[in-house]
Amino acid sequence: MKALQFDRFGSPDVIVLREVPKPEPGPGQIRVAVQACGLNPGDWAVVDGLLADRLPPLPRGLGFEIAGTVDALGADVTGVEIGDGVFGPATFDGPTAGAAEYALMAAWARIPEGVTAEQASALPMAAETAWHALDDLGVQPGELLLVHGAGSTVGEAAVRLALHRGIRVIATAGSARAAVLEDIGARVTGYGDGMAERVTALAAGRVDRALDTAPTGGRIDRLDRASPAGGALPTLIELTGDPDRVLTVSDFAAAAELGARTTHIEMRYDRLDEFARLAGEGVLAVSVARTYTLDQIHEAAELSRSRRPGGKLTLVL
């Protein structure tokens, strides 16, 4: 089968496409013929050496989240059959991962009717991150939440989940994503000079809580890095009046300095069935900006690392 691998750590340039044996599912695992593999900033961090001491020796694969058709069952697997469409995290403990023609999964949910494989592969990490962030921030129904960086995949998922929970939402986003966010019920304003004043006008008073979902540009291993939010946390604290009412999923250094909250998420994926239900009902979605084939991985990585992908980038097979 064809799969993406890397033999040394570095930039995405070290990633190569090669022929490798199909992985065999172990107990509790399934093998999936991959139709789509979502790309994340964390992929480039892993290629650059993040978690190097926790994963098997090189070569390794990349791609955390996939959607496809069940191809083989390991021992003790129940509730799923060969030919079923599923999505979820690919296993990451072998020489290949999700960016391959076949991948292994130990947790999964059925792709709901009306949702494509590309759309399903975009859900797991963004939905899991957004769900945990909203819980950790403690935002309650009826409160007014500001989602900064709402054009990101996590930001869009957070807006959708918050609205579903009965939370009022103001979102900051670029012009390319504003219409989508407005269509689902958020009030939207742009970044840049005057953002605080525009948000205050939309809120007609103080914002109850704020969630910073601006992307990290792929350097999630760097906690001393300045965020691409460009110093947004002080503004978010000003808008809420309390650093404890602000949470960031990316700007850890500024949060530590200013007293804002952070969330470090253990990806358990125990809510995949809930995410599938919400996606099937049209509540939860992550916009897919562009799709690529396996041999276009370097082009995809370049756009992903630009911090302006315009939505989810996905490999299709």
Image: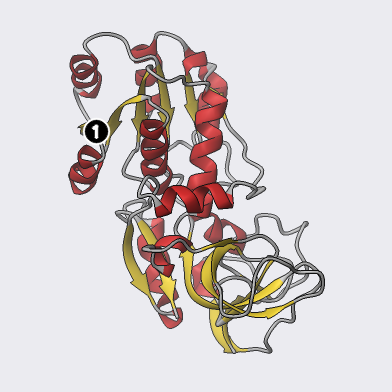
Q: Mark 1, residues whose alpha carbon is within 10 Å: few (<14), some, or many (≥20)?
A: some
Q: Nearer the viewer, residue 47 or 111?
A: 111
Is residue 90 visible in the rendered structure shown here?
Answer: yes
- Residue 37's x, y, as percent? 49, 69
What's under tag 1, amino acid-wise? Tyr
Q: Nearer the viewer, residue 265 or 302?
A: 265
Residue at left offset 20%, top offset 16%: 197
Instruction: State left or right for residue 192 relative to residue 141.
Output: left
- Residue 211's x, y, as percent? 43, 28
Is residue 214 visible in the rendered structure shown here?
Answer: no
Instruction: State left or right for residue 28 relative to residue 71.
Output: right
Residue at left offset 25%, top offset 19%: 196
Q: Quadrant of the C terminus?
A: bottom left
Residue at left offset 42%, top offset 52%: 279
Quarter assignment of residue 170: top left
Q: Which residue is mark 1?
A: 191
Q: Nearer the viewer, residue 167 or 20?
A: 167
296 over 110 or under it: above or below: below
